Image (spheres, rainbow, N blue to C red):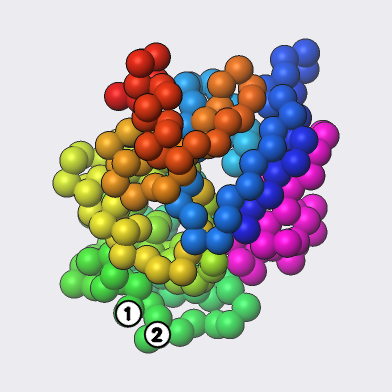
C-alpha cells in the first residue's frame, strides 16, 4: 500500500533521509520509530506530498504521491489536529464531512462518533472536551472518510494512560486498514503493530515487532 524507493531529503547541507527504501503491505500495522530529530516528521511529510521529494519515488496504493489520486485512499491524523472549539463535536464532524466528495452522511457520523465513544458528548462544545476527547474526535474525523490507509503522527502524544488505552482500543477494533503510525511508546507498539520501521542516522531498517525488540532492547532503544 505504501512503497518508498530511494528517498533522500536534506535541509541545506544536512542530509536527513538517506536512500530510504520501505514497503508497507496491505493490512499491515507498521510503527515509525526513531529518536527525536531522526527524520520521522520529514518522512511523513514527504509521503503526504507536503514536502517535495528531492530524490526517490513514493507510491500510495499504486498511485504516485506527486498526483492527487492517492488522496481517496489515505487519511492523515497529525499530532495536533485543528478542531473548531466553539462548535460542538457533531458540528465539527459535519463540517469536515462536508469537505469530502460524497457529502454529509448522518448515519456514518453517528456510527463513527459511537466508535470513539463520543456520541453522548456530541452536543458539547469542543472547547469543553478533554485532551483525550479531542484526540478521539480528530481520529473520528479521519475514520469518517473510511480510507484504506491511515497515517498517524504520535496519536497518543500527551495523553494519560487511560486516554492512550482508549485510542489503542479504537485502532485495534479496525479491520481492513493499513496503518503507518509514528510512536515512541514501545508498549503500545507491541500491543497493536505487526512491524517497525526504524529510522537511525537517516537510514531505514524494517523489522517485525518481535525482531525489533530482540535487536534493539540490548541497545536501549526499545524500552
Task: Identify the image quadrant of residue 206.
Answer: top right
Residue sitting at 51 percent across and 71 percent down? Answer: 145
Q: Is residue 156 above or below residue 136?
A: above
Within-10-Å neighbours for mark 2: few <14, some 14–19, many 20+: few
Graded by Cα atoms within 10 Å as few (under 14), some (14 to 19) or many (20 or more), the crowding at tag 1 reads: some
The answer to whether residue 131 of the structure is visible from this angle is: no
The part of the image, by quadrant, that contains residue 171 is bottom left
Q: 17 or 100, which is in the foreground?
A: 17
Counting from the top left corner in percent of width and height, residue 35 is at 47, 21
Residue 8 appears at what percent x and percent y?
Answer: 75, 30
Please report contact status of discs 2 and 1: CB closer than 8 Å, yes or no. Answer: yes
Residue wearing tag 2 = 106
Report the quarter where the C terminus lies.
top left
Q: Determine the secondary structure under disc 1.
A: helix
Marking on residue 203: none
**Residue at image coords 37%, 66%:** 174
Amino acid at each position: 500500500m505504501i512503497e518508498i524507493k530511494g528517498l533522500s531529503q536534506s535541509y541545506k547541507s544536512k542530509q536527513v533521509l538517506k536512500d530510504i527504501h520501505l514497503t508497507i503491505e496491505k493490512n499491515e500495522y507498521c510503527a515509525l520509530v526513531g529518536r527525536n530529530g531522526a527524520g520521522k516528521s520529514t518522512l511523513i511529510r514527504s509521503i503526504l506530498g507536503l514536502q517535495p521529494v528531492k530524490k526517490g519515488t513514493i507510491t500510495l496504493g499504486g498511485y504516485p504521491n506527486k498526483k492527487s489520486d492517492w488522496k481517496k485512499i489515505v487519511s492523515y491524523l497529525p499530532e495536533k489536529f485543528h478542531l473548531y472549539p466553539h462548535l460542538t463535536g457533531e458540528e465539527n464532524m459535519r463540517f469536515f464531512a462536508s469537505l469530502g466528495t460524497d457529502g454529509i452522511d448522518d448515519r456514518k457520523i453517528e456510527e463513527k462518533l459511537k466508535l470513539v465513544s463520543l456520541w453522548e458528548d456530541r452536543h458539547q462544545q469542543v472547547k469543553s472536551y478533554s485532551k483525550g476527547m479531542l484526540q478521539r474526535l480528530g481520529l473520528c474525523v479521519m475514520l469518517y472518510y473510511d480510507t484504506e490507509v491511515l497515517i498517524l503522527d504520535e496519536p497518543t502524544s500527551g495523553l494519560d494512560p487511560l486516554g492512550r488505552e482508549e485510542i489503542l482500543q479504537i485502532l485495534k477494533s479496525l479491520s481492513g486498514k493499513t496503518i503507518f503510525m509514528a510512536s515512541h511508546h514501545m508498549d503500545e507498539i507491541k500491543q497493536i503493530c505487526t512491524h517497525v520501521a526504524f529510522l537511525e542516522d537517516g537510514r531505514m531498517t524494517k523489522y517485525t515487532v518481535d525482531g525489533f525488540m530482540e535487536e534493539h532492547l540490548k541497545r536501549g532503544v526499545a524500552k
